[in-house]
Amino acid sequence: MAEHQLPKLTVRVRFPSSAPKDYPAHLFAIAAIAFGLGLYGYQARRGHRPGWPRHHGIGMGGSYIALLTGFYVDNGRFLPLWNHLPHWIYWLLPSLVGVPFIWRALHRFTQSTSDKPIRAPASL
């Protein structure tokens, strides 16, 4: 997605043509967080400053978690199996599942790109 299209996406999320006048403000807040994190990750990728992959991973991964949170908060009550869960699960489960995956990916990436010498395999 081009950089100039991101603001249009956020405006569409906030003011869809078919939304009622009492459009939930919490969905706009989730969309704003997702947009901010996505922009942060995108800018980190463009900047190529030292440590940019970590910032890019946090921004893009966090944006995806926010996207899933918004989806489940808005549609969870209509989904099979999800409709039996309490409402607060829709808010927490994407983060509880996503953050450990992002942390592990960043941890493994950091280990693979560190300046530590690679040990030779033990000979038999």
Image (cartoon, rainbow, N blue to C red):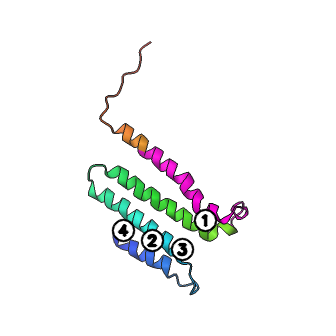
For marks 1 and 2, give the CA distance: 16 Å
The magenta stretch spans which residues?
A: 79-106
Looking at the image, which is closer to me, 103 or 56? 103
The residue mark sitting in front, 3 or 2, is 3
For marks 3 and 4, give the CA distance: 26 Å
Magenta stretch: helix, strand or loop mostly:
helix
The residue mark sitting in front, 2 or 4, is 2
The residue mark sitting in front, 3 or 4, is 3
Q: Are marks 1 and 3 in contact (CB under 8 Å)?
A: no
Q: Position of residue 68 (x, y in %)?
A: 55, 62
Q: Residue 2, which numbered label?
A: 4
Quarter of the image with the N terminus is bottom left
Is residue 60 placed above or below 123 in the rendered structure?
Answer: below
Q: Sequence order check: which comes first, mark 3 or mark 2?
A: 3
- Amino acid residing under circle 1: Tyr
Give the residue pinned by disc 3.
26
- Amino acid residing under circle 4: Ala
Q: Residue 32, which numbered label?
A: 2
